[in-house]
Image (tube, rainbow, N blue to C red):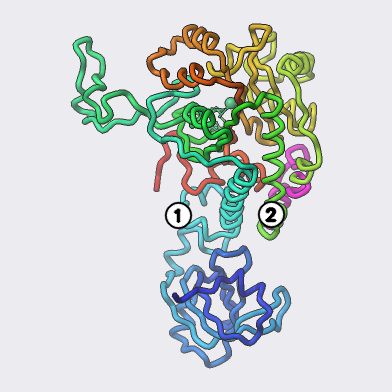
Amino acid sequence: MKKNTTIVELLDSDQLLQQVTVQGWVRSFRNDRFIALNDGSTLKNIQCVIEDDLLDDAVLKRITVGAALVISGTLIESQGKGQKVEIQVASVHIEGDANPEELKLTILSPKKHSLETLREQAHLRIRTNTFGAIMRVRSQLSFAIHQYFQQNNFHYVHTPVITGSDAEGAGEAFKVTNMDLTKVPLTEKGEVDYTKDFFGRETNLTVSGQLEGETYAMGLGKIYTFGPTFRAENSNTSRHLAEFWMIEPEIAFCDLDQNMDLAEDFIKGTIKYLLENCQDDLEFLENRLIEEDKRKTQAERSEMKLREKLHFVLDNNFKRVSYTEAIEILKNSKPNKKKKFKYPIHEWGADLQSEHERFLVEKHFKCPVILFDYPANIKAFYMRLNEDGKTVRAMDILFPGIGEIVGGSQREERLDVLKEKMKALDIPEEDLWWYLDTRRFGTCTHSGFGLGFERMVLFVTGMTNIRDVIPYPRTPLNAEF
Ligand code: 4AD
Ligand code: MG
């Protein structure tokens, strides 16, 4: 097998004078002599130096930004500043030209582009430093997540993407069908006849793997899912996607306190991994943020540098606050009294909007917050009812700049209470007979949570729009590529 050498390996190599071949895309070409080549393996480029008269003018002309090259030569100690090693070029093969005139219309021309413009060029934006850094961090974070759970004896479960249930009961599921939509079969009553559909029943894309995850935790003990989830929420915000990835651990014999401990330890463990393994990319993203901040007003600027913020999360306990305490704080807060909230907080029972969550985290506590014991009627049917009969063992983790990053709960393990709850919410028992069975046969205390992967990537990269941390964002009226 012929092994290709990556630039990240060479930059780290101390085997000088070895013959090497690198392959990548031109980032810059100066004085017909210095090529900065990038292959995506690292943020850094490798400098390739062409001696006079090595190449014909015709070839030199084709070495332009964006072109794909295969370069062979000798790895030598760099003569210039800024890098340890460079390549003394022996040959250049141009595998793919990039016409500079056409390129001007894309993001690859060296001038700076806004993130919005880059979004329209989502197939090319990965050739920029910013998106290279984000996507490498995203990849490393995925790995850190798997590593965390595997090291803690969790089993990875692949819950289905197509399902008959709507776990969150929010009615935001995308339907799945292969019916001819111009000739939809109807029942005698004039309703859609799903018995004629592919699965013989109504199905949708999953909004969460939780319910199926719970059934597996009832046999494997500790499980997690990590997969795409889909929500047809018509929220055009910088925090919502119609397709996003979610990590959902589910643990048998685990109560809400242990669930909160796990979530906090998990978030800290994965952030620690990034700080240790993504130094170059995090440093680049940190500097990007500093530059971006210069164009902002004092009030809009971040209080901490990116890595400082990540260390802050590692070094401090998340503040645990009950919903009831939070409502008191919000009720008496300045923005509430001065009518600055779009949704003023009048009384206990109000659903918290992102403005409230961000006030608690960014202004009041100034650290990550775990809110728990929410009113039953603003949360999903499966959460365990407290002794007070009006709150449930729910917990949300709120992060600065992000708002809700985790939603979880202790599950209702008592069959009779669960059935009551479903009845009150008009959820037919027939639809979830399999879920109820877990409460019939060896039910036990259990808990879990869901972490929105892109929200976590937003946090660790310091980006502000969720569309910039997923390769191909899906949002209302937008599914290009
Ligand atoms: O709070 P949610 O809706 O909780 C659940 O789905 C539970 N079944 C999880 C569980 O207990 N196993 O969603 C969990 C997290 C949110 O906290 C948020 O981070 C993220 O998923 N999320 C979204 N991220 C991007 N775009 C959206 N439209 C999102 N909706 C939720
Ligand atoms: Mg939630």
Q: Could you give the CA–CA distance between mark 2 and mark 1, rounded to whole angstroms?
A: 23 Å
Picture residue at 45% right of the left edge, 19% below the top: 437
Q: Nearer the viewer, residue 323 or 373?
A: 373
Count of numbered badges drawn on the protein? 2
Which label's residue is closer to the chain start, 2 or 1?
1
Picture residue at 58% right of the left edge, 15% below the top: 378
Q: Quadrant of the N terminus?
A: bottom left
Q: Nearer the viewer, residue 90 or 8?
A: 8
- Residue furthest to the bottom: 53
Query: The disc labelled 2 sits on which kind of residue?
Result: Leu
Query: The disc labelled 1 sits on which kind of residue?
Result: His
Q: Secondary structure at mark 2?
A: helix
Number of the label disc, if any, that sits on residue 282: 2
Is there any visible trace of residue 239 in the rendered image? Answer: no
Q: Nearer the viewer, residue 137 or 466?
A: 137
For mark 1, what is the residue?
Answer: 123
- Residue 312 at x, y percent in the picture: 79, 42
- Which stretch appears magenta? 284-309
Picture residue at 44% right of the left edge, 29% below the top: 232
- Residue 102 at x, y percent in the picture: 42, 64
- Residue 393 at x, y percent in the picture: 65, 18
Q: From the viewer's perspective, is 216 left or right of 400? A: left
Q: From the viewer's perspective, is 202 left or right of 141? A: left
Q: From the viewer's perspective, is 429 left or right of 47? A: left
Q: Nearer the viewer, residue 440 or 454?
A: 440
Callout in the foreground (2, 1): 2
Q: Quadrant of ligand 1?
A: top right
- Residue 296 sits inside the magenta stretch: yes
Q: Secondary structure at mark 1?
A: loop
